[in-house]
Image (tube, helix red, strand yellow):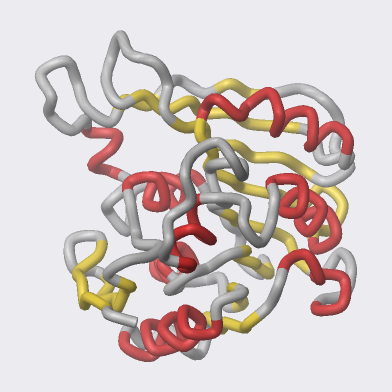
Amino acid sequence: METTFDDILYGKLKMRQPLCGPRISVDTVLLAWFVRLRQGDRVMELGTASGGISLILAKRWPTVSFITGIDIQEELVKMARENAEINGLADRVTFEVGDIRNITSLYPPQSFDVVVVNPPYNEIGESRASPKRGVAISRQEVVCTLEDVVRASYHLLKDRARLYMVLKAGRVSELCWLLEKTRMPLKKLKVVYPKPKVEASIILVEARRNAGRGVKVEPPLYICDESGNYTPELMSAYEIGGK
């Protein structure tokens, strides 16, 4: 696998990433920024790729000592482990090969306080799949569906524990239906727009296992202002202390 070695978050992280495959993007940085952790939380990242979100969380929340990520692609897991070593985080962040469709055989039920996931955005058939398998897995529901992700999260989380996810805005109705069906109601929603006066691009969500109803809809986030400049809120997501 051809890779690049990149500075992430203004050089706060150094990461090896696949040249063609899942890479750190604005969406993944925003997801890590949206997550809230507490001392003692046990955190699971589903579909970790080269470990970016898990490593950002470890940098941002130094009192959290148990973060683990799983991915179905062994080569990416090896890369994630290397990235943890490079950044001096291997004592707090671990990575394992695993298929979330078999999550019940990998981890005991209700064994995590937080699940974080950036699932494939596109359903099979919605767009043409990339001939590169790694790219196809990250972008389309080739090896897991959104429902697989929600079910795995329900299995892993304790009651009232939190699921954080980023997803394209057009799938909000489907996601809400799946969360309700799985008894993990939506609790917090932030809608992200590329700039003012255009349609939303992604949503950031927090859901909770077996929680009561009632949703906090946060103010929208704009990536760029009307002049095309990055907004202060977007820039804050790239700061380790930006929360």
- Residue 107 vertical placement versus 180 (above, below): below
Tell me where residue 206 appears, x and y as whole percent: 64, 40
Asked whether 107 or 209 is in front, the reply is 107
> Which quarter shows the N terminus?
bottom left
* Residue 36 makes an appearance in the image: no
Asked whether 176 or 141 is in front, the reply is 141
Asked whether 187 or 142 is in front, the reply is 142
- In the drawing, does residue 205 fall left or right of residue 21? right
- In the drawing, does residue 187 fall left or right of residue 239? right
- Residue 52 vertical placement versus 29 (above, below): below
Tell me where residue 222 appears, x and y as whole percent: 31, 25
- At 42% from the left and 21% from the top, the residue drawn is 200
- At 51% from the left and 90% from the top, the residue drawn is 91
- At 45% from the left and 62% from the top, the residue drawn is 53
Q: Quadrant of residue 70?
A: bottom right
Q: Quadrant of residue 6?
A: bottom left
- At 25% from the left and 60% from the top, the residue drawn is 9
